[in-house]
């Protein structure tokens, strides 16, 4: 099992910034990628950003491109999401997802989520 612990959510005014963190821990595993998704109540979970662990390649949804930056610290098994120029529509529960290889198998793990609320 891999545990993901997110932190950094909160309440911020529109135009402000927040930084989310997600730390992965568990017995021996190899991380393939980590990413962030978000979900509003009553809506489907949507992709926000992803980073590959070995090469550090990043992908963003169009709605956050240019405002959000995903990064990683391999030594700490931690992924970050720097969110700038926040808008009211960025309000959601943000979830961290890890794609890992454990015991020769690919597994997907999710964090418990951290709430981001942007006031207009």
Image (cartoon, rainbow, N blue to C red):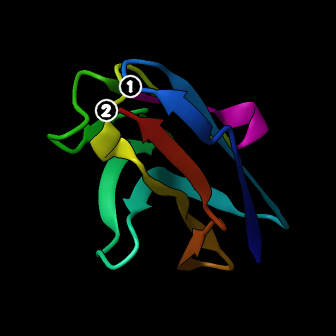
Residues under numbered marks 2 and 1 in contact, where contact means CB atoms less than 8 Å apart? yes
The range drawn in magenta is: 69-77
Tell me: residue 76, above or below residue 98: above
Residue 116's place in the image compared with 41, above or below, is above
Packing grade of label 2 (10 A; few <14, some 14-19, many >=20) is some
The image quadrant where one finds the N terminus is: bottom right
For the residue pair 72 and 61, the one nearer the viewer reads as 61
The percent coordinates of residue 78 (x first, y second) are 68, 40
Q: Local crowd at mark 1 within 10 Å, few (<14), some, or many (≥20)?
A: some
- First reached walking from the N terminus: tag 2 or tag 1: 1
Q: Position of residue 74 (x, y in %)?
A: 66, 35
Q: Quadrant of residue 49?
A: top left
- Residue at image position (68%, 79%) is 103
Q: Residue at x 22, y 30 (%)?
A: 65
Residue denoted by label 2 = 87
Q: Which mark is residue 14?
A: 1
């Amino acid at each position: 099992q891999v545990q993901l612990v997110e932190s950094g959510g909160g309440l911020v005014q529109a135009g402000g910034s927040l930084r989310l963190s997600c730390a992965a821990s568990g017995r021996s595993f190899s991380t393939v990628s980590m990413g962030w998704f978000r979900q509003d109540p009553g809506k489907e979970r949507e992709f926000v950003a992803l980073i590959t662990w070995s090469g550090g390649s990043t992908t963003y949804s169009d709605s956050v491109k240019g405002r959000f930056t995903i990064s990683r610290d391999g030594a700490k098994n931690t992924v970050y999401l720097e969110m700038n120029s926040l808008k009211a529509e960025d309000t959601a529960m943000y979830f961290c997802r890890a794609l890992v290889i454990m015991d020769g198998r690919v597994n997907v793990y999710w964090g418990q989520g951290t709430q981001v609320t942007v006031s207009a």
